[in-house]
Image: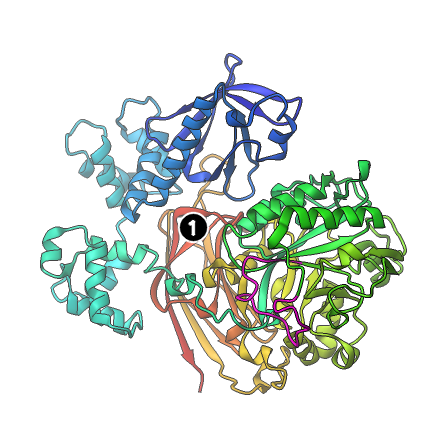
């Protein structure tokens, strides 16, 4: 097939599915050129036809039925391919989708078997299907284990049932099982087992009640666990669970730290929009930094596919009368506004049915604003909200439930909803078209500092009536003060702040900020000085009840970890209901003094970090092995911000054991997000990141739980995990 990178870069590649049906191998035509592989596990989607900018650029050369795009998880770039024939393209598209489906449907045991099999292949250097002791020793280093050679040889000999001096498939699996003996889990198993050999149904009920603190129909739940996870039919007949079954339960989604019931939409979705935190993206079109990065519709597809519900579109006059999208006054590449609208229309509701907000930063002339309105109306059709829901002037914002399947425009508007949906009746209006011009914000905030984008005064432009009419519930306005807003603002008006201005308001009038956000929407976006497109912590803005906290989705790190953590609940639908004390205007809540609110109930969170399993190797130096430590971070109101660490374990990323206990007091637990971070300790320089997992305190399951770690990109890295014991108790 041809690998396509641009209109001019098209190279022939040989592709082959390996025998394991999990690995795709490819090599260029050049003799001696090294080959590459990727795993089916790394794939997120396969898109047919001209569904990328690259393939659209060569549409006149190659028909759609021969083209497809392979989309990888995380932030890895797509692979655009052209097959020799339509039949061949279909064969690959259907085949890869089927293999991805197989991976999705794998049970815990199958996943682990596959993982072991992958390692066996990596270590079997001469491909003879057997492994001698030297190969096994090398494998242990690759797997992050620095094991005593005598002990390793002892396990090797015990596993070598055929006495051949080499391990074959089944023998290697046996060796692996001996290597990964879970003494930590065995200790818990034996504590609850009546005979030390198995758990009776009654033993399981005791464990669920006393350790996992589960209260709903424990008898039925214990029966289900045996049915679901016990591999031995003999044990099932005895209504019992062996150690293998117990281990599989603890390693499953049910045994994980995240409460599975919180994965579905479980919150009330019928409250006004301003009562929800809304997953929001900044400079959505950018794939990299905001000075020289590539602009792409792929940014919108990726954000919407992650459950983002508010995307940003920076619009400027383009050639041939077509508005363009890019980061103005920088060297970022440009894309057509029309293409952005097509992508949003297509992907808006693939993962969530709840409304999408298009946040427009408008720098266009009247003529090109009219073109924008035409594209919005023509491409989005019924999806674009053009009038109030019942056709009359409403008294409050509608709910996510009311607005299902709708796309809302957030931009300037002539007049208000009270003036009727036709606005003021004028053809155009002079005024500030965009109140989110970062260059102007930088000028306002930093009079004496040089701006990374060229200095420009806030321009007075005319607003087209056609574009104004597309704005209903999200009219962008300039903010003057909380007092002015309280007396004059309308519920449908949205103010936007840079992070520095939002912080200033939070410091000076935290309770007022929270109250303001109980009535209307607020958007906060990163400073224009973040030229590397880094992120601020969204938590401080959530503490003020700000709903639209816009982050650079293309930039991995703590900010996006917290965002993924908060919005990982409620069906990943992009909307999370704020706590009651933030939505009721008469209840005073100041994030600086959370203990002064009605219903104040502080909690203690106790985390015993017990062990780690198969942590990924992060240092590429040969022979280097991880020295892991675990840091537990609390992100919440200022009083709750805290972090504590375990000690580090020397030279063992494979099965480190800590049994270290960390305790935290939480004064506003409803706003707390807990982040577990694993790092490779380095006494001479900065620790290396190994993995993390973030989730809201309210989604934590108590008891003995596994935490399935995520990479820096937010993708899973099975079977890497932490084993912990969690207790959440009420303070007297």
Q: Tell me where residue 16 appears, x and y as whole percent.
A: 41, 23
Of residues 313 and 424, the one nearer the viewer is: 424
The reply to whether residue 684 is in sight is: no
Quadrant in the rendering for residue 157: top left
| Residue at image location 70% in from the left, 45% down from the top | 289
Q: Tell me where residue 309 appears, x and y as whole percent.
A: 59, 57
Q: Main secondary structure of the magenta part?
A: loop
**Label 1, residues with CA under 10 Å away: few <14, some 14-19, many ≥20:** some
Q: Is residue 200 one of those drawn in magenta?
A: no
Q: Is residue 644 left or right of residue 297?
A: left
Q: Which residue is mark 1?
A: 650
Of residues 147 and 99, the one nearer the viewer is: 99
The reply to whether residue 489 is in sight is: yes
Q: Tell me where residue 588 appears, x and y as whole percent.
A: 63, 85
* First to last magenta residue range: 388-408
Q: Is residue 537 left or right of residue 464?
A: left
For numbered disc 1, what is the local secondary structure?
loop
With respect to residue 100, does 677 lie above or below? below
Q: Is residue 703 left or right of residue 264?
A: left
| Residue at image location 19% in from the left, 64% down from the top | 223
Q: Is residue 396 one of those drawn in magenta?
A: yes
| Quadrant the C terminus occupies | bottom left
| Residue at image location 42% in from the left, 50% down from the top | 650
With respect to residue 635, does 484 lie above or below? below
Of residues 519 and 204, the one nearer the viewer is: 519
Quadrant in the rendering for residue 281: bottom right
């Amino acid at each position: 097939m041809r690998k396509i990178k641009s209109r001019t870069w098209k190279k022939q590649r040989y592709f082959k599915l390996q025998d394991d049906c999990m690995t795709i191998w490819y090599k260029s035509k050049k003799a001696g050129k090294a080959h590459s592989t990727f795993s089916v596990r790394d794939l997120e989607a396969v898109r047919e036809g001209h569904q990328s900018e690259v393939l659209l650029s060569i549409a006149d050369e190659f028909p759609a039925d021969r083209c497809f795009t392979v989309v990888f998880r995380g932030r890895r770039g797509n692979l655009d391919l052209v097959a020799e024939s339509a039949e061949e393209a279909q064969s690959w598209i259907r085949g890869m989708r089927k293999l991805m489906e197989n991976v999705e449907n794998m049970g815990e045991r199958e996943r682990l078997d596959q993982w072991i099999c992958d390692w066996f292949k990596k270590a079997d250097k001469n491909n003879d299907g057997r492994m001698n002791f030297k190969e096994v020793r090398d494998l242990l280093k690759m797997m992050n284990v620095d094991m005593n050679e005598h002990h390793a040889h002892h396990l090797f000999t015990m596993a070598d049932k055929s006495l051949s001096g080499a391990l074959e498939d089944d023998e290697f699996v046996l060796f692996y099982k001996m290597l990964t003996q879970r003494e930590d889990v065995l200790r818990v198993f034996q504590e609850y087992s009546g005979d030390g050999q198995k758990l009776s149904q009654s033993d399981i009920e005791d464990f669920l009640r006393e350790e996992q603190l589960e209260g709903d129909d424990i008898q039925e739940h214990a029966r289900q666990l045996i049915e679901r996870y016990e591999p031995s039919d003999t044990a099932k007949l005895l209504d019992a669970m062996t150690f293998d079954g117990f281990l599989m339960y603890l390693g499953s989604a049910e045994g994980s730290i995240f409460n599975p019931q919180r994965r579905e939409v479980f919150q009330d979705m019928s409250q006004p929009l301003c009562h929800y935190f809304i997953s929001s993206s900044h400079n959505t079109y950018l794939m990299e930094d905001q000075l020289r990065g590539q602009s792409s519709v792929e940014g919108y597809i990726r954000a919407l596919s992650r459950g983002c519900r508010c995307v940003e579109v920076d619009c400027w006059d383009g050639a041939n009368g077509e508005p363009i999208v890019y980061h103005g006054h920088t060297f970022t590449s440009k894309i057509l506004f029309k293409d952005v609208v097509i992508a949003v229309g297509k992907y808006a509701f693939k993962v969530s049915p709840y409304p999408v907000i298009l946040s427009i930063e408008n720098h266009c002339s009247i003529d090109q604003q009219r073109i924008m309105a035409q594209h919005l109306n023509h491409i989005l059709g019924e999806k674009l909200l053009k009038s109030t829901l019942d056709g009359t002037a409403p008294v409050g914002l509608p709910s996510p439930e009311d607005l299902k399947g709708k796309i809302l425009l957030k931009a300037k508007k002539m007049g208000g909803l009270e003036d009727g949906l036709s606005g003021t009746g004028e053809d155009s209006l002079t005024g500030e078209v965009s109140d989110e011009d970062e260059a102007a914000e930088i000028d306002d905030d930093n009079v004496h500092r040089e701006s990374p984008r060229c200095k420009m005064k806030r321009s007075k432009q005319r607003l087209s009536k056609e574009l104004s009419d597309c704005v209903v519930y999200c009219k962008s306005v300039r903010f003057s003060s909380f007092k002015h807003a309280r007396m004059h603002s309308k519920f449908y008006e949205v103010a936007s702040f840079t992070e520095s201005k939002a912080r200033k308001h939070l410091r000076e009038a935290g309770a007022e900020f929270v109250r303001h956000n109980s009535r209307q929407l607020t958007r906060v976006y990163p400073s224009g000085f973040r030229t590397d497109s880094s992120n601020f912590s969204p938590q401080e803005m959530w503490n003020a009840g700000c709903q639209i906290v816009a982050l650079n989705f293309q930039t991995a790190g703590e900010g996006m970890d917290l965002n993924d953590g908060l919005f990982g609940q409620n069906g990943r639908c992009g909307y999370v209901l704020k706590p009651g004390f933030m939505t009721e205007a008469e209840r005073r809540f100041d994030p600086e003094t959370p203990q002064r609110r009605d219903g104040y109930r502080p909690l203690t969170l106790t985390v015993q970090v017990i062990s780690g399993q198969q942590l990924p190797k992060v240092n590429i130096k040969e022979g280097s092995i991880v020295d892991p430590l675990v840091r537990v971070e609390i992100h919440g109101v200022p009083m709750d911000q805290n972090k504590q660490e375990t000690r580090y374990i020397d030279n063992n990323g494979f099965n480190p054991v800590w049994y270290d206990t960390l305790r935290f007091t939480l004064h506003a637990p409803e706003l707390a997000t807990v982040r577990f971070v694993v790092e490779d300790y380095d006494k001479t320089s900065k620790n290396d990141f190994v993995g993390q997992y973030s989730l809201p305190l309210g989604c934590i399951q108590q008891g003995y739980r596994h935490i399935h770690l995520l990479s820096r990109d937010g993708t899973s890295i099975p079977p890497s995990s932490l084993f912990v014991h969690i207790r959440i108790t009420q303070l007297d």
